[in-house]
Image (tube, rainbow, N blue to C red):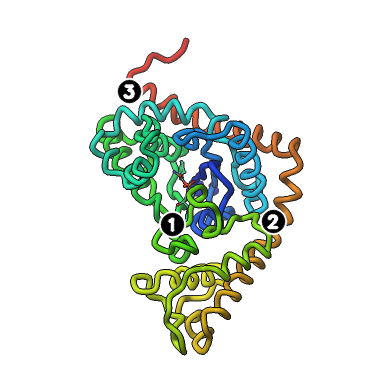
Amino acid sequence: MEEKKKVMLSGIKPSGDLTLGSYLGAIKNWAERAEQFDCFYFMADLHALTERQDPAELRRHTLEQLAQYVACGLDPEKNTLFIQSHVPAHAQLGWVINCFTMFGELSRMTQFKDKSAKNAENINGGLFTYPALMAADILIYQADYVPVGDDQRQHVELTRDVARRFNGIYGDVFKIPEPYIPKIGARIMDLLDPESKMSKSDDIGNGRIKLMDRPEDIMRKFKRAVTDSETGAGCIRFDPVNKPGVANLIQIYASCTGETFEQVEAEFAGHGYGDFKKAVGESVVEMLRPIQTEAHKLMSDKAYLDELCRKGAEKASYVAEKTLRKVYKKVGLVPKA
Ligand code: TYM
């Protein structure tokens, strides 16, 4: 009998345009795994609601994100691609998981602390319980691996804790998932503020590269990227503590070209920052060029995207509802006659 493939699952909030951070930290890692795993990737639109969204923009970002997933190499025949809100079982299991997640655990989440500090006028219940919904997203597919960037590691750890707690009471209901974090690219920093993560929504734009940025804008942003005042041979070296801007550029270049940090250092040993920034910009432009061409084609094909959403939600729902039924039964809810 053919051995059952392990399950891989991940999602991205359609709360803004995808960035180079979301690509190198997450999507690139997904696209390389379709043959090996049974893969589920979704647009986490319910999660996006924890911050105020313009409704039309949220809809646009959600469908564009789907087109961009496909353009990044996620073949819809080999991966289940769907919109989170099209599979109501996520929210349904989310409630149950909420009831097994402790206030203290949620209070310790660094993303909650960061987001509430930045957005003091909208610290809503959803922002606080967000990791419980994320745990439900993962557990409902019995995922083995969750490919994410470094900032989501804590949420996956919490998912493991809650799943173990639940299994401890009700038996082996959930698979215990593992975070799957790339060695290079797990934490891409803002080009103008290399102490902060490159984010979809935080700044006015010059410190972050969007997946769909025009080549001239990408080159301009890299030209302005913050480095430091060191000059001379050997100034391009990987030292994230003392040289965060340069380390970030090395990381980006290594991730785009597949080189190691040492190889990048050797390649640019005799060069200054100007040459290096140009080379990093070019490597990003070349990596994104085919993705952008394909995404532009797909983004305008609404009928195709609608059909993908429909098929994806159907496939995902089948798996998700199976887990939900099992959980409802375990916790004592009366099945519908
Ligand atoms: P989100 O939308 O903030 O980010 C999406 C993915 O991109 C990664 N990422 C980065 N990686 C490296 N450098 C960066 N600068 C960078 N910025 C973002 C993130 O680590 C993430 O992998 N809660 C999740 C979405 C989610 C989810 C899930 C993920 C909802 N349910 C279930 C996995 C499984 C989030 O807000 O990611």
Kind of element beneath mark 1 = loop
The residue pinned by badge 3 equals: 331
Q: Which dot, 3 or 2, sits closer to the camera?
A: 2
- Alpha-carbon span between mark 1 and mark 2: 23 Å
Q: Is residue 132 visible?
A: no
Residue at horizontal 43%, vertical 60%?
Answer: 187
Q: Is mark 2 within 8 Å of ligand 1?
A: no
Residue carrying label 1: 197
Position of residue 273 relative to residue 94, above or below, is: below
Question: Is disc 2 surrounded by few (<14), some (14 to 19) or many (20+) residues within 10 Å?
Answer: some
Mark 2 secondary-structure assignment:
helix
Residue occupying image coordinates x 57% and y 72%: 280
Q: Amino acid at mark 2?
A: Gln
Ligand 1 is within 8 Å of the C-beta of the residue at disc 1: yes
Tell which tag, 1 or 2, sits nearer the viewer.
1
- Report the Cα–Cα distance between label 3 and label 2: 47 Å
Q: Which residue position holds label 2?
A: 292
- Of 70 and 174, which appears nearest the observer? 70
Q: Amino acid at mark 1?
A: Lys
